[in-house]
Image (tube, grey):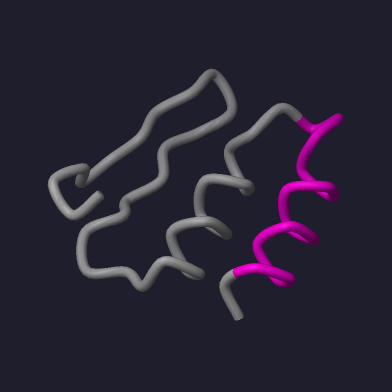
Amino acid sequence: RTMVECVATEYGVAHLHGLSLGERAAAMAAIAHPDFREELYKYAQENFY
């Protein structure tokens, strides 16, 4: 998990270097398909914060 610095999708780029697990989850949810973002944010909040 600590070796990934950036994740890119057609919806953006998440810079993950130095982030906590919760911050990483939120950053990746932000670049997910819009239909799934809300569900991913909710999952991140329940499991990482």
Answer with left or right where residue 33 lies relative to residue 14. Answer: right
Give the extent of the magenta segment: 34-47
Viewer-closest of 6 and 45: 45
Residue 30 spot, x, y in % from top left? 62, 48
Residue at 73%, 48% in the rendered image = 40
Q: Quadrant of the C terminus?
A: bottom right
Which quadrant of the view contains residue 43? bottom right
Left or right relative to 40: residue 14: left
Magenta segment includes 40: yes
Residue found at the far front of this picture: 47
Farthest bottom residue in view: 49
Q: Is residue 16 above or below residue 28?
A: below
- Taking the spot 32% from the left edge, 51% from the top edge, the residue there is 15
Residue at image coords 50%, 33%: 12
Q: Is residue 18 above or below residue 35?
A: below
- Horizontal and vertical percent position of residue 38: 84, 50
Q: Identify whether 11 is placed above or below 45.
A: above
Q: Which residue is located at x 18 percent, y 54 percent?
A: 2
Q: Is residue 11 left or right of residue 1?
A: right
Queried whether the magenta region covers residue 3, the answer comes back as no
| Residue 41 location, quadrant | bottom right
